[in-house]
Amino acid sequence: MPGIRKAKAVRAIVRPDRRDEYLERWRRYASAAAAVGARVRLLEDQVLPGRFLELTEHQAGEGVELALEQAVQAAELQRSCVRREGDEVLYREVRLGV
């Protein structure tokens, strides 16, 4: 049976004049996350441009969460956001047995 997968959703608000910077920083994060086997998605609100939902899904395992946190810090995502920290939501997979 494969291991449990975890997911993290983070909301971010980015000013229009920092959007390109944010997207470049997120590309760096996405590349580092992929290197540890994570799948990432970046969604932008259709009504309020600059409001993003960052999704990261990964296999639970020793050191993976730390590697992902280090990737966030290395990309300095919060530097280009009006708000990012503290809006983190963590999920873990629920196995239904179907």
Image (cartoon, rainbow, N blue to C red):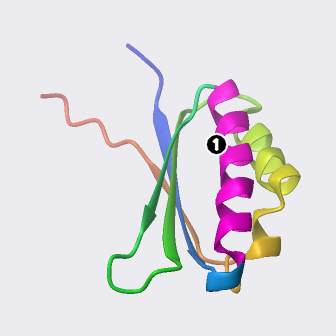
Residue at image point 12% right, 28% down:
98
Q: Where in the figure is residue 15, as x and y percent of width and height? A: 65, 85
Query: Which quarter of the figure has residue 87?
Result: bottom right
Number of disc labels: 1
Choose between 96 and 47: the one closer to the eye.
Answer: 47
| Dot 1 alpha-carbon crowd within 10 angstroms: few under 14, some 14 to 19, many 20 or more | many
Query: Which quarter of the figure has residue 62?
Result: top right
Q: In this view, does 65 lie to the left or right of 46?
A: right
Q: Where in the figure is residue 60, as x and y percent of width and height? A: 58, 32
Residue at image point 47% right, 23% down:
3
Q: Give the range drawn in magenta.
A: 18-36
Q: Where in the figure is residue 38, as x and y percent of width and height? A: 57, 33
Q: Mark 1 points at which residue?
A: 30
Q: Where in the figure is residue 78, as x and y percent of width and height? A: 77, 71
User: In the image, is residue 28 part of the stretch drawn in magenta?
Assistant: yes
Q: Residue extending furthest left?
A: 98
Please name the amino acid that badge 1 sits on. Ala
Q: In this view, does 25 lie to the left or right of 94?
A: right
Q: Main secondary structure of the magenta part?
A: helix
Tell me if residue 72 comes above or below residue 77 in the rendering.
above
